[in-house]
Amino acid sequence: MTKQWTRREYGATRQPISVDADDPVLDLVVPVFNEEDDLERSVRRLHAHLRGGFPYPFRITVADNASTDATPRIAAALAGELPEVRSLRLEEKGRGRALRAAWSRSSAPVLAYVDVDLSTELSALLPLVAPLISGHSDLAIGTRLAPGARVVRGPKRELLSRGYNTLLRSTLAVGFSDAQCGFKAVRREVAERLVPLVRDEEWFFDTELLVIAERAGLRIHEVPVDWVDDPDSRVDILATVLADLRGIARIGTALARGTLPADGARPGLLPQLLRFALVGAVSTVAHLLLYAALRPVTGAQAANALALLVCALANTAANRRFSFGVRGRSGALRHQARGLLVFALGLGLTSGALAVLHLADPGAGARTELAVLVAANLTATLLRFLLFRAWVFRTGAAR
């Protein structure tokens, strides 16, 4: 059984990384497969950028995963010529496998990777790693989907990217905005704990890494990037999409069973649903009792609104702690504010149900009103769970 762990287990507070002029602070991995046409140009451009404007010692690791062309020879030649470049040869394909091998062999305190096509503007590299060096964050990702990012790509790629990240947010309730941008970094002590927990060896590797990290409560810093699509990309889109869907299904199943190795995070889907249902049942009973007590004084609509408001505040607080495992005061006001917006939707649904009832049967009695409210509340409860999970209590990325 994989050991579960929490952020508290190995220290919630990160210390700034000390800089030694002789040892690389950053190990930047470039995973490649049959890139003989672009490798030398890209590595020289990357090396020149780091030499000219990066204020910390660095290393560039070309991780060749089973290339069959001249890529290994070019990588070895670059490593022989440029003192900050090294090459690593693997006999099996897979970007995740290449990152796992390169990161596990590195002694640098900050580990990162960038796609060989250098689609991401390199000026974002220092903002990517600076929060890790300072101790502010545990991981950092480039994002093409946050305000401030500038992206040049075709509509097909744009639609696939946004669709994939929307699917992640709706199914796995993630908070980070862009899982696929090939521009990420992680502190080494974090990678040492995270990487062995990741099962995927290919394109889903870093998505799985981020999901586990977020579920463990680690801080993920996002950097908006300028990004230009590589029209000559060799990525098999269909195969990648299918592999990603399988990965999402596997992670979703682990979350539902409570077996994802991220003990410090919220409960899995099934425990969340069961706890939410229990809180909802108590809230429904409380709402009906309060409605019955207030109706003779305020009338049906006002009694429903007041009862729903009081129960909504209590429901949000209970679900925050009990159902979704959110502890501490941080974000409590934001959660209540979002919960009130969800309450407004519930109010509209239940009030609308009462209004329809009174139009259809102006003489409806209290029992009929209660029956209609029960049905409306059940519908509102399902909507509330989905919104709570995907929006109100989702784990946000560090900004």
Image (spheres, grey):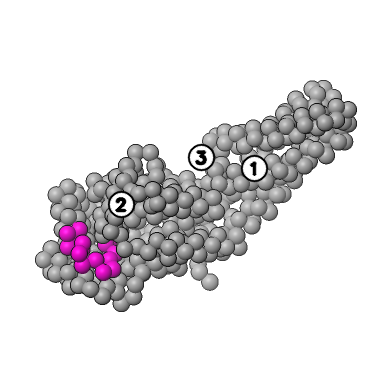
Residue depicted at x 74% and y 39%: 376
Mark closest to the chain's N terminus, 3 or 1: 3
| Residue range (magenta) | 29-43
Name the residue that disc number 2 marks: 229
User: Which amino acid, by three-letter code, is at mark 1?
Assistant: Arg
Name the residue that disc number 3 marks: 330
Mark closest to the chain's N terminus, 1 or 2: 2
Find the distance from the CA under tag 1 to the CA under tag 2: 38 Å
CB atoms at circles 1 and 2 under 8 Å apart?
no
Mark nearer the viewer, 1 or 2: 2
User: Residue 88 lies in what quarter of the image?
Assistant: bottom left
Q: Please state the horizontal and vertical placement of residue 333, each as a whole percent of the image.
A: 55, 34
| Residue 14 forms part of the magenta stretch | no
Name the residue that disc number 1 marks: 384
Which structural element holds mark 1? Answer: helix
Horizontal placement of 306 versus 236: left or right? Answer: right
Q: Which label belongs to residue 172? A: none
- Of residues 223 and 235, the one nearer the viewer is 235
Mark nearer the viewer, 3 or 2: 2
Residue depicted at x 53% and y 46%: 394
Q: Is residue 90 above or below residue 151?
A: below
Residue depicted at x 60% and y 63%: 257
Task: Say few, some or many: other residues with alpha carbon within 10 Å of mark 1 (under 14 / 14 to 19 / 20 or more).
Answer: many
User: Which amino acid, by three-letter code, is at mark 2?
Assistant: Asp
Mark closest to the chain's N terminus, 3 or 2: 2
Q: Is residue 65 above or below residue 48?
A: below
| Residue 36 forms part of the magenta stretch | yes
Q: Please state the horizontal and vertical placement of residue 299, each as a whole percent of the image.
A: 80, 24
